[in-house]
Image (cartoon, rainbow, N blue to C red):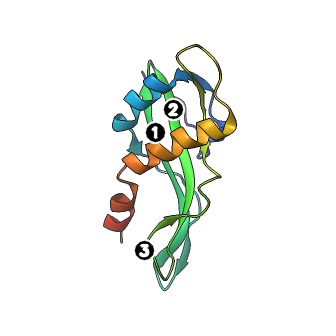
Amino acid sequence: MRHPPLSPHVADWPFVRATVTEFKAAVPQMQPLPTGLPVDETNGESRSGRSVWGTNVGGRRIGIEWAWEIREDVKLVLSNPMALDTNVLLFDNDNRLLGELESLIQLGEAIRELPWIEHLLSRH
């Protein structure tokens, strides 16, 4: 099934409802997606940008988006771990919508599982 072109920002994608269990099962299938978003470059090297990783679940695209930057003391870091975007509405196994903090924790854990740092470093 072909999907129509989506905005580079996952927050603009249609919402997808998933339990935490379903979301965790989908994370290993996530791949980096082209964003078409500008990257801050210094001397031809990316200094900051945005990553979008996603996959299809049940014919619907889900994704996570975050900003990253290169710092002097640490190679690559999330710019703001509290500013993660997704189109997934996370529910617990009792069908209750997770709160903002609980959702951020789940998204942060997912990002830690993704090889996003290796992916970015392999491009430079």
- What's the CA distance linking mark 1 and mark 2? 5 Å
The residue indicated by pointer 2 is: 62
| Residue at the image point whose x is 45% and y is 69% from the top | 76
Residue 112, compared with residue 20, is above or below; it is below
Q: Quadrant of residue 80?
A: bottom right
Is 14 positioned to the left or the right of 47 in the image?
A: right
Badge 1 crowding class, 10 Å Cα cut-off, few under 14, some 14 to 19, many 20 or more, is many
As drawn, the residue found furthest toward the top would be: 94
The tag earlier along the polypeptide, 1 or 3, is 1
The mark found on residue 96 in the picture is none
Q: Is residue 120 visible?
A: yes
- What's the CA distance linking mark 2 and mark 3? 28 Å
The mark found on residue 54 in the picture is 1
Between disc 1 and disc 3, the foreground one is: 3
CB atoms of marks 1 and 2 within 8 Å: yes
Badge 3 crowding class, 10 Å Cα cut-off, few under 14, some 14 to 19, many 20 or more, is few
The residue indicated by pointer 3 is: 75
- Tell me residue 58's x, y (percent): 44, 18
- Tell me residue 95's x, y (percent): 60, 14
Q: Amino acid at mark 3?
A: Lys
Q: Amino acid at mark 2?
A: Ile
Between disc 2 and disc 3, the foreground one is: 3
- Tell me residue 4's x, y (percent): 54, 30
Q: Quadrant of residue 99?
A: top right
CB atoms of marks 2 and 3 within 8 Å: no
Viewport quadrant of the N terminus = top left
Badge 2 crowding class, 10 Å Cα cut-off, few under 14, some 14 to 19, many 20 or more, is many
